[in-house]
Image: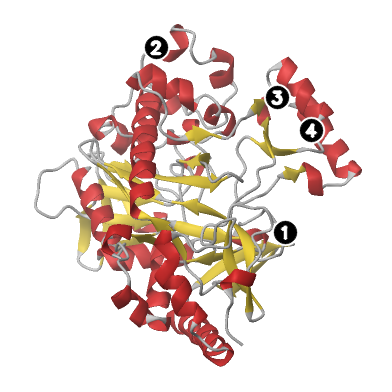
Amino acid sequence: MRIDWKAYNTKGFFDELIDGQGNVRLHGQKLAQFFANLSADELKKARAVADLAIKEMGITFTVYNEGSMIDRAWPFDIIPRTIGKNEWQKVELGLKQRVEALNLFIDDLYHDQKIIKDGVFPRGLLEKSVNFRQQCVGINPPNKIWAHICGSDLVRDGKGTVYVLEDNLRVPSGVSYMLENRSVMKRVFPELFEQMSILPIDDYPSQLFDMLAAMSPRPQDKPEVVVLTPGVFNSAYFEHCYLAQEMGCELVEGRDLVVEKDDCVYMRTITGLQRVDVIYRRIDDLFLDPEVFLPDSQLGVPGLMRAWSKGNVALVNAPGAGVADDKVVYAYVPEIIKYYLDETPKLENVPTYKCLDEKECDYVIKNIDKLVVKPANESGGYGLLIGPKSTQKEQQICIEQIKVDPRNWVAQPTLNLSTVPTFDGLEPDGRHVDLRPFILSSGKDIQVTTGGLTRVAMNKGSLVVNSSQGGGSKDTWIVDEEAE
């Protein structure tokens, strides 16, 4: 039995491969034809090859469950997501605009706070921000860039409109899985990469290294760049190892680094101390330096903030960047873009209700069964209430939490997220997806990955795509339609 795309039902959703009339979209025609020509046995074999590749490559993610840690093989679907190059170029411009404005916003908050003085952004919102770091006030990171690496989550609604769902500016993760997804697909279907004009993503590690090197406080041909990890028990440890290896950098833990009397950071090596210029840190702010933040942190480096504030080492992302990684701040991004760039946003926000506003909060409470309600600073799908799929008891608990701390909650309409064909048994069925592209900013240039990490809700009807909540992933192909 072969795939019959005419029988594929989009169920009223915007499907990224098949339109509402059952026709294959231009950027996916060669892909759809290729899969339609595969027999059931060939599809089964392809899935087995993908599973084996994931095992051989050691691609895993960690799930925390009731106090235990479980390493699981990366859940992967072999039908890639395709997006046309012409559309992607517009998305790319919108992401660049957004990150440029957010970096200006963060720098302003730690200096003159003009956006607050001009009445565009509420002072009370900043005062109650859990990610604003008073210790960063007045510090000037290189080129005034605070969020060097951003992972913005994108979704489509039922009409196909692309929205930014949220911005991840603290320690954005997932790019290694984007790269590994491509490696798996090249093993499974190498012929497709010869038949189709798929834009490459393989240069991301070199782009990342070049951006990190550009942040070095010392002018030299090859600065010492390290990746700082919390260690093997961190859920993203696979990614830390992967990126360090791909960039040819040392992977270090806090105990491997020391700040000397000259306020410079050094790495302990078998030949003695070696100065470090740039730290790509994968540790949250509060664990970075026990002299400044949590005094009992065993993950950070005493004196690290002092070295950074004096310009002797670069920290990427900069401490304090998370002040803009807040779902309430997210609601103000259109105003932030207008204020700093005097431009209209090229990518839309999802309409967002701020519970700190009395009228909007009242609306949320009265319509909680229809909305998606989110805590301001959680990630990974934790703390989320999806109104239409929740019980009255869950709704009531959420309402009580909102009343206790309205600043900490926002709500959004339940979007009819777009779907992509995903294998359920041997037949493709539509599953909801989002997309996390990664944006690199050096202050001289902004680069966006050609595509990103597509996360897919593997459970039928589910809108939750996070791997920690049962989601999976797909390779994302930006296809040059004109070259097809």
Q: CA distance from mark 4 to mark 1?
A: 27 Å
Taking the spot 59% from the left edge, 28% from the top edge, the residue there is 328
Question: In the rendered image, which residue does mark 2 sit on?
Answer: 114
Residue mark closest to the camera, 3 vs 1: 1
Between 460 and 440, the residue placed more toward the observer is: 460
Kind of residue at disc 3: Cys
Label 4 neighbour load within 10 Å: few <14, some 14-19, many 20+? some
Rendering quarter of residue 125: top right
Ranked by sequence position, the earlier of labels 4 and 1 is 4
Q: Confirm or deny contact between disc 2 and disc 4 (CB under 8 A).
A: no
Q: Is residue 277 visible?
A: no
Query: Secondary structure under badge 4?
Result: helix
Question: In the rendered image, which residue does mark 1 sit on?
Answer: 461
Q: CA distance from mark 4 to mark 3?
A: 11 Å
Question: In the rendered image, which residue does mark 3 sit on?
Answer: 355
Label 3 neighbour load within 10 Å: few <14, some 14-19, many 20+? many
Kind of residue at disc 4: Gln
Ranked by sequence position, the earlier of labels 2 and 1 is 2
Taking the spot 44% from the left edge, 37% from the top edge, the residue there is 291
Q: Confirm or deny contact between disc 3 and disc 1 (CB under 8 A).
A: no
Kind of residue at disc 2: Lys
> Which disc is residue 251 wearing?
none
Question: In the rendered image, which residue does mark 4 sit on?
Answer: 401
Ranked by sequence position, the earlier of labels 2 and 4 is 2
Ranked by sequence position, the earlier of labels 3 and 2 is 2
Asked if residue 300 is positioned above or below residue 147 in the image, the reply reads: below
Taking the spot 75% from the left edge, 45% from the top edge, the residue there is 386
Q: CA distance from mark 2 to mark 1?
A: 45 Å
Kind of residue at disc 1: Gly
